[in-house]
Amino acid sequence: MQFSGSLSRMRESQKAMRRFYDAIAYAVIAFMLVFALFPLVWTAMTSIKPEKDIVTNELQYIPRNPTFEHYVTLWNRSGVTTMFRNSAFTTSLTVALVILVGTFAAYSISRYRFRGRGAILLFYLTIRMFPSVLMLLPLYIMLRSLGLLDTLWGLALTYTTFSMPVSLLMLKGFFDAVPADLEDAARIDGCTRLGALFRVVMPLARSGIAATAVLIAVGAWNEFLFALMLTNSEGSRTWPVVLQLMVGEFQLPWGLIAAGGMISILPIIIFFAFAQKALVRGLMVGAVKG
Amino acid sequence: MNPSSSPSVNNPSDAIKHQVKRFNPFDLLGKLSESRYWAYVLLAPSLLLVLAVIVYPVGYGIFLSFQQFNLMRAALGMKFVGLEQYIELFQEEDFYIIIKNTFTWVVFGACSQFLVGLITALALNRKSIRGGAVARVLLLLPWIIPSVVAGHMWALLLDSRLGVINDILVWLGVLDSYQAWFASAKTAMPAVLLVDLWRGFPFFTLLLYAGMQSIPDELYEAAEVDGATGWQKFIAITLPMLTPVIVAAGILRGIALVNSPDLMIVLTNGGPGLATFTLSLYAFQIAYDNFNFGAAAAVSVIMLMILMVFTMLYFKFSGVTKNT
Amino acid sequence: MKKMTITRRQFLKGTAVTGAGLAMAACATPAPTAAPAKKVSGNITYWHHYTSESEMAGLKEGAEMYMKKYTEAKVESLTVPNADFMAKFTLAVQGGSGKPDTTMISADRVPDMVGMGGLQDLTERIKAWPDKKNFPDKYFNAATINGKIYGIPSFMFVDWMYYRKDWFDEKGLKPPTTFDEMFDAAVKMTDPAKGRFGFGMRGGAGGQGLVVQVIRAFGSPLVQDGKAALDVAKTTEALKWYSELHTKAKAVPPSVTNDSFRQIMEGFQTEKTAMLWHHTGSLADVMGFLGKDGKKFMSIPRPKGPAALINDISPSYNGIVDDKKNPEAAWAWLTHWADKDTGIMLMEKTGYVPSNQEAAKDERITKNPYYTAAFKALEIGTTAPQFAGQPAWQSSVVLPTFQRILLGEVTPAAGAATLAKGLEDAIAGKLK
């Protein structure tokens, strides 16, 4: 029959098209992997070359004299482990605070219709719009009067505030995606609004919350300016400060910086390996219905 | 956790007795959550935090922008000069170059990162693709590495003496000799934009991919029955469904580009000449090289105004704050 | 009369400090022995911008020496990255807490740090300091504001020029002693086919100081009687000569506008450049890659400009920021770093030249040809004029303007005018 013939031809052509698109997709992914990873591979290579093989006229693609000296030097620097620990603490605390406080705010914006919601979103964003340069001095004075200067709690509190716009925008999207009916059902069963938030909404959006947590964690883990400016002793400094301190006035130790870079992405990769499942699912549900 | 489903809630009079007998904050919270103030109660902690941190600096900044005040000249004190510092800024030729650079940096940066992020997300989103899970993590790495390291490593990659990219381009015959990408007024901005593209595209890929995953398959299947091509499906389904994510991601990235000069500081520090000099670098320089806090405040207020206007327009057009 | 009262007040203050010191010493040590007049005890903090392994090793050993010498004092040091130093220092001073007791002071920052009230006047202490005789007066120039001294020098950065001795010998050229000879040599040394350039010009970050030195070598003053006094004609000449090394002679690497310390060093290290302007701070590095036998490279004073020989020496000072807590321990820390033995120790670790003249006589220094060259430069050393706003003017006006001249966007004459205008603004504290 002519009709089914054309249908099968259409199917054929659709199949061909699909294969064609798949080929393009593979090409795109391959290209992007090269683009994304080449600098990192080069960083890894650099981290195991002796300094003399980096600053040289003869470019070495494969390190001829591989060495782990940079990693050893880095790890032996005084205070490195403390600073790594400080970073881990500050990051965890920040994520916990942001998720707790941000969840409430995002839920409110997502579920309630009150005047000035747009204005509030905009207001939260101002914290990102005003140059941090001019925030430094007032922040410093504020933390001092709270007794939080030079403490990890002070840093975490600062990061929490500065992460608020990101978490608010993202979490709002995730909560929007949770159907209101489910919540209503829970409330008929005797839950309060608060109960419904903890027992229905948050579990359903948990993967979205995980995704937000990753965004916040990466930001807090890598923050440098506040970490340097709002602490005054070795004991409360964080990892990005260590990295920055390797760049000296009269030196730029490529190998050390590269090694530092490799070390600093490790924890995040591990975190991702665990969070990956939740992350993908979360982003699936969330972000989304604005 | 929250014992709000205790009998007290089911029976209001019980609840009152309960509370009189033994004060339980969770019960109180549970009750509060039913009241009409709950929306504000939820908002309060973060709002207070943001208020505490933002109001004083911004207010003080606006106040300072009308004063002549140099931190190093305590003796000169503060002098009210009205709009003088704003007027002087707009009278300077260089200021327009700086604004233009900022515009180029943000618009090209955000757009290129969005486009590349989108294309990557589309490729990852194809169901028939294998190894997508691993690729997704690997493609996120550029966004995870600290910017100090990213900046210096790219400086090394593109270096005019030690740079492997120059070496490859010469080997491919694209270049005759090593180029100093950051030293020429023509190539410095594109080079920095390339580095930021590398750093920023994963952010979009992450969010857009997530958005695509949430679009119901039925929509595509229905379109396929109607004989829609891939492009038509993209225009009619994917793009509209993605709009909210695009808006949120776009605004966050845009603001980040305006306000974080960290890559630029490592790679060019605004040079050569003024070729990559942007507003955020300018504000930092005026404040902490020149200590002219009055003028730095004026620049900051101008930045804030520009960003506010753009964000408001953006919100308006995208409808993200509309009541749905 | 007036002078009299001041002296008396200071005398009273002095006794008060001694009293407090005694009281504290009595508290700290349960068995009070015959304590010396000024007891060195307590914890002090120290900010510095040392970063490299060798610098850190020197600092560590120096701190250990100090704590061995003063057993009741303890020092805790904090690295502050040089680029962020002023921002951080400003926050601590203006933010009302977190000030260090003592700090390292880069010479060009003294006026700004004094301007914000961040440094203590050390004049009286220095007058009474027995070691003072080992330091030429000019070493204190950059730390003196309105007749008051705010820091004591620990080591010196001595400007000089490195050149490739082997290449110069090959071509039968003598190392340049004037700007004209240098220009000539730069042209002759340039060989694009070999990827070789005559001069590793620093046109990127940090190059601003060198531009100003060239301007001074052409005879233009910067300030007179506290007012901007840039001679536009001479500045134009200076900018023209310096920029033409690139724009006309093509004797510097094309990457010049982005070449900061790292790049010019790597250019020299990968044997791409024949001459280089820097100071003694990089000697250890250069010896590391070109050998210390005096065959491949040598160092000589900078060549003489048309009007003057500018070969700056700039001390790295230490100063007291907070004298409330343990002023005696802080002062002891300062003098400890100006001590001959500490200086030699640091030099052996880092190659930095000690400021104490006694150290210069030590044979560990006299044996090394490069150190001898450094001390020769030290003798003829000039000092840069200091005024509040100078670092700002250099980094936010001189550098970008000079880069634009190198790029051909601005003429030297227009550039000189921009510099003059910027200098006025900088001195008035109105620079944007």
Image (cartoon, coloured by chain):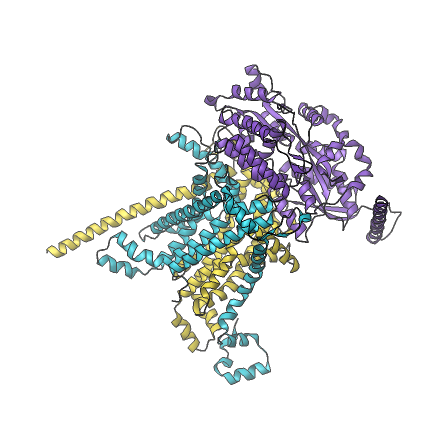
Residue extending farthest to the right is C34
Q: Is residue A38 above or below residue B233?
A: above
> Which of A171 and B308 lies nearest the eye of the viewer?
B308
Image quarter hosting the C terminus of chain C? top right
Give the chain coloured purple: C
Residue C118 in the image: state x and y as whole percent. Answer: 70, 47
Q: What colour denotes chain A? A: yellow
Residue closest to the eye, B139 or C239 = C239
- On the rendered image, what quadrant is the N terminus of chain C found in? top right
Question: From this viewpoint, is residue C206 visible?
Answer: no
Q: Hey, which residue is sitting farthest left in the picture? A: A1
Choose top left, top right, bottom left or bottom right for residue A52: top right
In the rendered image of this protein, does residue C380 appear above or below residue B89? above
Describe residue A14's horizontal placement relative to residue B259 as left or right.
left
Q: Where is residue C90 in the image (x, y as percent from the top left)?
A: 65, 48
Residue A267 spot, x, y in % from top left: 51, 50
